[in-house]
Image (tube, grey):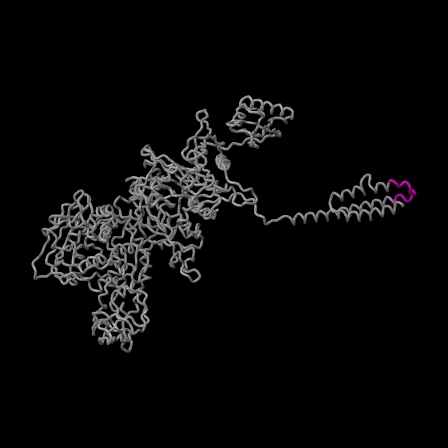
Amino acid sequence: MDILAALDSLVTEFESGLALASTPESLEELRVDALGRKGKLAQIMSRLPELEPAARPAAGQKANSVKERCNALFEARKQAILAIRESAALRRFDPTLPGRAPWRGSLHPTTLITEEICAVFSGMGFDVVSGPEVEHDYYNFEALNMPAAHPARDMQDTLYITGQTLLRTHTSPVQVRSMLARRPPLAVIAPGKVYRRDSDLTHTPMFHQVEGLLVEEGTSLAHLRGTLTIFVRAVFGAQTRVRFRPSFFPFTEPSAEVDISCSICGGEGQVAGQPCRVCKTTGWVEILGCGMVDPAVFAAVGYPEDISGFAFGMGVERVAMLKYGIGDLRMFFENDARFLAQFA
Amino acid sequence: MLLSLSWLREFTPYEGSAEALGDRLTMLGLELEDIVRPYRDISAIVVGHVVECGAHPESDHLRVCCVDAGQGETLDIVCGAPNVAAGQKVAVALIGTRLPDGTVIKKAKLRGAPSSGMICSERELGLSDNHDGIMVLPGTCPVGARLVDAIDLDREVLDISVTPNRADCLSILGLARETALAFDLPLTVPEKALTEDATLPQTLVPIDIPEPDLCRLYAGRVISNVSIVPSPMSVRHRLQAHGVRPISNIVDVTNYILLECGQPLHAFDLDSLHGGRIVVRRAGEGEKFTTLDGQERTLTQDDLCICDADRAVALAGVMGGLNSEITGESRSVFLESAVFKPENIRKTSRRLGLSSEASYRFERGVDQRRSLFSLDRACAMMAAVGGGSVRRGLSCSEPSPFVPARISYRPARAHTLLGVSLSAEFSEKSLRDIGCAVDKSVAGGQRDVWQVSQPSWRPDITREADLIEEVGRLHGLDSIPPVSPQAGQDIGRAGQAPSLYAFWSRIRHWGAGLGLNEAVNYSFVGHKDLDHLGLPKEDRVSILNPLSAEQDVLRTALAPGLLQTLRNNLAQGAQGLRIFELAHTFAADATETSASTGTGVRETGKIGILLYGARHDAAWPRPEADMDYADIKGIVEHLLHFLHLSAPLCEQKNGHPWLLPCVELRLAGQVDGRTTGQTIGWMGRLKPALAEPFHARKDVWLAELGLDALRALHESAHMQFVPLPVYPPVRRDITVITDSGLYAGQVFDHLKKLDHPLLADVALTDCFEPQDAQGERRLTFRLTFRHPARTLKDAEVDKEREKVAQSLIQALGVRI
């Protein structure tokens, strides 16, 4: 066969070979067999001296175009095979299989809410302070204008350790300890566990509170309103309305309870035509107690008579129940992992 | 406090709705709890007139009545009551009416006689237990009118929550005063209308008060010739609507006036008062006294008694005595109106666990200037309903007359405290409206200081702050504009260590981030829970008045609570549990009395971790396995690393009461130049024998570390950058074959002690225990060699490895 015919048949042969090959390895074998240093093309070209010198350049050109053609065929076939491989591999890949997930931890809802509350007040310059849970009667009651025979003690049924020590009924004793340790100006926030001798559907003998105190010359009820309005909107949303109702606490005067517009019904009192169970159709939900620090408390800690300040306190579980829609208070302390895991 | 709108209207002409009143009072600090409609169930009952009352043809005891109930034509109603008679006004349930017990009245035939309705007894209407006969209404009741209107039942009753400071609002009068204030209405206090019987001689009861501190006022009057019968319908129904059970005319009046005026009264049977006199004295220590609820009480010297010439007849301010109570045979009444020291009444009431409407009011303070009025009004009412006559003469002793507090009021201070500018006119009017006398003359003192005197019914108003509260309350706390607070950072406190709260918070986030669930258990458990684990009994802190035996002691360790949580979860079918908790443990410690808390209780912050059961929640894609020692230890080491602390020294403790094994955790630290090991906690496995009550069938792994120690160590540890090595490491494995009893830690320790200059790191890569070999273990360690200044050659590393191997053989007697 003459050289040119041999070159032509090399292409045909190579092309049909490629069509049969199904792996990159067999393709490579074909390529080496045809185009390698000792391959068929080289063998054909080794016969070049057989040609007339004038015919040699044409044959050389022909050889180059054969080589290019084969390479192109080879590349095309290689890509095709790789594409088939990839799609086969993708067919085996199942993106819907579960992941090898690390453990899913969670924070207790009271922790989440406490941190949220403390973050808002820290941002306003309050220091977070802590104190003992077993307290002396003096810090828990006496210094807070609740002498032994004060009817206000009825508001907080107490678990006693001895006649004079008890499980704190609120975190206010931390405020007393803070005031005794520091002089005004003072802005502290005290989160923690508190205890009452009470256990039913809506009371647990232990729960969490966050209480705050700010003492500074010239502080007024208007500042208290401002502070709590900022807090309520930060925690319950910018649309939340706030209502101050006069109330009574022995350690504040004037005292108020703060209602917020019901986060469940938006203050409408109804959800889809049904009476709202959370606010009992009033549109308001009680969220915290507050007031201007009573002069008797300032006297107990030796602060100047005409200083002024405000204090406030709230139940963490109550806020959590409203924010997360938890209906049963007791769930907080049963620690069912299915409950806990929801507060990641 | 229950407040009926119709009773309220006897004091002030409020014409609005119950809801509007409730809203307004709520915003004045008297929170509306509920609006009760006690007679809603009988609102369909109408007044009928019995035109004729004839015999039933088939029955001796049934009567056939022809009743005009305003329905256009008369109704035939068959009635079995013995007292039914022509001419009576009666309560009629028409056809279709539902009675309070749910019965619906239908057209019926009774023994053949058709009956179109029912004439009702009080019991059938839920008004009383009386079922002796039908209810006979006053002749003035209009035919066809609704019964509730005709006899003016208290249809709408507001339930108002009264805070402990507002003693004055524990009466209809007090709430009427607030209503008048709120709506700018006049307040009319009804006339006392007392008529002493001029025909009878004056009767005085001598009153002796040897304890003037405890009894500020004691007064009484005598009513004679009374007959003890049930009260008239209007009184009974009103009391019922206010939650008070009617008893008899005389007792009912004391309750009626208590509700109306807020003054507790007590009616004695005068004939059972020995010597016809009253002595107000302290009880003898251990004195026995039977209160009129039939309970015998043991008294102390702190209790105040009302006595006759010989004995106690009432526990002052709390409850009367059985020996002098009004009975059906009583003919003469001595009616007491007194004022006692609030703190003393409260003490007695609390100690005896005996709270009454009277003690509730005395504890909070009653209006002493209203006491005699209330007495007189009650006497007049008793005479009216009891048929008796009020004897001439008021017996009265008042050792401490009421003296109103004189309070300096500075409008400027009010402005500072409320943060809103109120006009002098508004402030003055507010103070006068609540009943204060206001003296603005400068003669008495400084300029801009008003002299204000306390109203007798407001024991809570004694100081300037109390007045400011009143002014603020009337202005409306809700209409004070909010102002952004000024709390600024205190430069003096900048740079202090993060708060304890912040440290706990970091650890909580570590736990959650690691994949543990945070639990919160009660701080108290039962002694038996601590006993179960064999925890020491000595330093426990018991609760004096626990709610139950399950919660009678404070936790001395977190484990009992965590195990409780485990039990709860296993009961819910959990396969595995990974929880942590941060809380205080409590121990009695006498030295704490002198320390900062002064409570005699040492509180220690702890973190507790519990691991149980399946290592992974899903079976796929990891092999199923239960958690073991390596899991709990890994978590503890992770925590210490998180706090920039070194790995703990682990030492097994033998003979632990409830853990097997129990590993004590210590941290090596430098104190004054020498190495110490500070104990920071423990970890281990709950003894399987103790796991049964928690339904745990697999291993329970627990760890507990002291947060106070960790915090101190963490704060003294600081991160220090170590330059990264420049030259590559060369690694060699070495397998150590040990006999039983050699810990991996000993190998680590030995290699560390070698202080080999090229040995940069040692890690365990395998631990294999062949089945056949008794206690033999094969520990494979990976040694990393590195030279700080050049690349090591294979040959020299091999030489160094061999040196290390030889030293292990020599020092620990192992095979390589």
Region rendered in magenta: A46-57
Looking at the image, the residue that sits furthest to the top is B810
Residue A80 in the figure: left or right of residue B407: right
Q: Quadrant of residue B759?
A: top right
The number of numbered discs placed on residues in the rendered structure image is 0
Q: Quadrant of residue B16?
A: bottom left
Does residue B78 belong to the magenta stretch? no
Q: Nearer the viewer, residue B182 or B501?
A: B501
- Residue at image location 85% in from the left, 47% down from the top: A9
Looking at the image, the residue that sits furthest to the right is A52
Q: Quadrant of the image for the N terminus of chain B? A: bottom left
Is residue A216 among the parts visible in the rendering? Answer: no
Residue B675 in the figure: left or right of residue B463: right
How far across and how far down the image is residue A202, in percent?
36, 51
Q: Nearer the viewer, residue A173 or A305?
A: A173
Please identify the dominant SS of the magenta region: helix
Q: Quadrant of residue B590?
A: top left
Looking at the image, the residue that sits furthest to the bottom is B73
Q: Nearer the viewer, residue A218 or B742?
A: B742
Does residue A51 belong to the magenta stretch? yes
How far across and how far down the image is residue B345, in percent?
22, 48
Q: Quadrant of the image for the C terminus of chain B? A: top right
